[in-house]
Image (cartoon, rainbow, N blue to C red):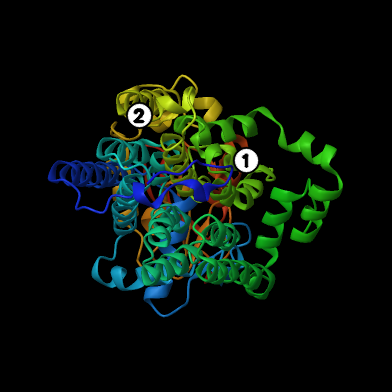
Amino acid sequence: MSARPGVGESSTPRANRAATAPPTWAVASVAVMCLAFAAQFSLWQMHRYDNFLARRFDLGNMVQAVWSAAHGDMLMTSTDLLGEQVSRFAGHVEPVLLLFAPLWWIWPSPVMLVVVQSALVATAGIPAYLLARRWIGDERIAVAFCAVTLMYPFIQAQTLFDFHPVTLATPLLLWAIWAADARHNVTLGVMVVLAAMTKEQVGLSIFIFGIWIAFGLRRRFSGAVVALFGLMWSAVVIGAVMPRFRNDSSEAMLVSRYGAFGDSVGAAMKTLILHPIHSADLLLTTNRVVFVLALVVPLLFLPFRAPLLAAAIVPDLLINLMSNHPQQQQLAFHYGAVAAPFLIAAAIRGLGAMRTSDRSGDDALARRPRVVIPALAITTLICSWLLSPLPFWGEPPMGRTGGVNRERATQLTETDPRAAVMSQAVRMIPNDAVISVGNGFGAHLSARRRVLTFPVIADATWVIVDTKLSAMGDGRDVKGHRERVNRLLLDPRSRVVFDRDRVLVIRRNLGR
């Protein structure tokens, strides 16, 4: 049975969904791709960690939160600006981190976080394959979409950038979309709840996802429940939980990132709605336009054929585009984690609608696997070559525009000759000491109650810095770093206990 597709997404016929068991070759192909992704990205992440390229920002921040949870301290961390002890909920609501506490008891290492992240993200290829199988009905294209998902530049980049709870939203939301279509309500509920727990604004995208379930899948009750949950989640955590824990540092970060639109969420939304010309002038910059194009071009603009499902990216996309923080418009980081699953699923849905169309012309090409598969493969490879940080591509031609550069590509394979010196310096610092660390040492030394980020020193009894990199917080300032180190060395309470290859370990006697 076939149906003529209309403008809505519900036009994809149920008859196109494969009811038979998948063939062995397809299962094997998907399994090999997912396992290869998990293994290779785990190895790259471990290489970055061993060479001190995973830093306080952001792996160290997550390590301290998980360590705190594992020791019964509910995600307490040391703030980066003032060195205050606050809950992680002051800046982001990511209760999924609590689930990593039992894993920390088993494997108490920062490496555990990045390995688990790589393994979980790798599973995103499975629901992509299953969705393509249901909506398109062609095994070859379904397997191709598994590959496209795992080669999608945003998914690769976020998996390589340390560890972030929101990165887990990518596989969780793809599994939720599959569960909604397959009518696995328990799985849908679990995945939606877990996805919401990865970051406070994810509930807004889940709200639109629920609307799609209600009208795109014609599951009114399930869609209403999902939409209501998503809206209530974000409303409660943004409106009540975060203000309850917020401190001076988190307030300063909010104003610094969104000050152009307003000093609060309400003020920002008011500016966006009531001053569209001013807002457009702020939003339509080169880096923001490139960011949006990088989201849809690898998918051949297919998400536009399923607009209601693709619309779930709008809340998170606006949050990133409205920010003054340039990293939020660069694919080298984790800011595409919520958009990626909806765009991939919308691309599959859109292609499925095109393949069942009775119209002639371009849509007819979508019915031919010999056209679709090479088109997807070539586009994905070109976009990876232009934007991906993977080392076998060399320096990405458009890498700097997208936020990826040669440094990020080579750090996956090249060994830092100073890594052994850094490791020796790290081993000198007691596990229970209050410390101030340069950004590069943060991931290795954050499994403790109190860890400050240089140049914040406060009550630290140990300081470790790399005078070659001149790290000040998450940035670099050669002059400021040199001045701050010199003041520290002139302090009579300070004693240098390690000085090798421009790595300094300083012991502070605060009793004097």
Q: Closer to the camera, 441 or 96? A: 96
Residue 448 in view in this figure = no
Look at 41% across and 65% down and name the residue there.
191
Q: Residue extending furthest right?
A: 274
Q: Residue extending furthest front?
A: 1
Query: Pointer 1: residues within 10 angstroms few (<14), some, or many (20+)?
Result: some
Q: Amino acid at mark 1?
A: Gly
The residue that mark 1 highlights is 480
Q: Secondary structure at mark 2?
A: helix
Tell me if 186 is positioned left or right of 358 in this view: left
Tell me if 29 is positioned left or right of 15 in this view: left
Q: Position of residue 231 (x, y in %)?
A: 62, 67
Look at 57% across and 40% down and name the residue there.
327
- Identify the disc placed on residue 445: none
Q: Position of residue 349 (x, y in %)?
A: 45, 44
Task: Tell me if residue 83 comes above or below residue 384 in the rendering.
Answer: below
- Identify the disc placed on residue 410: 2
Residue 253 in view in this figure = yes
Q: Amino acid at mark 2?
A: Thr
Q: Closer to the camera, 217 or 438? A: 217
**Disc 1 versus disc 2: distance between alpha carbons?**
28 Å
Q: Position of residue 40 (x, y in %)?
A: 24, 41
Residue 107 falls in image quadrant: bottom left
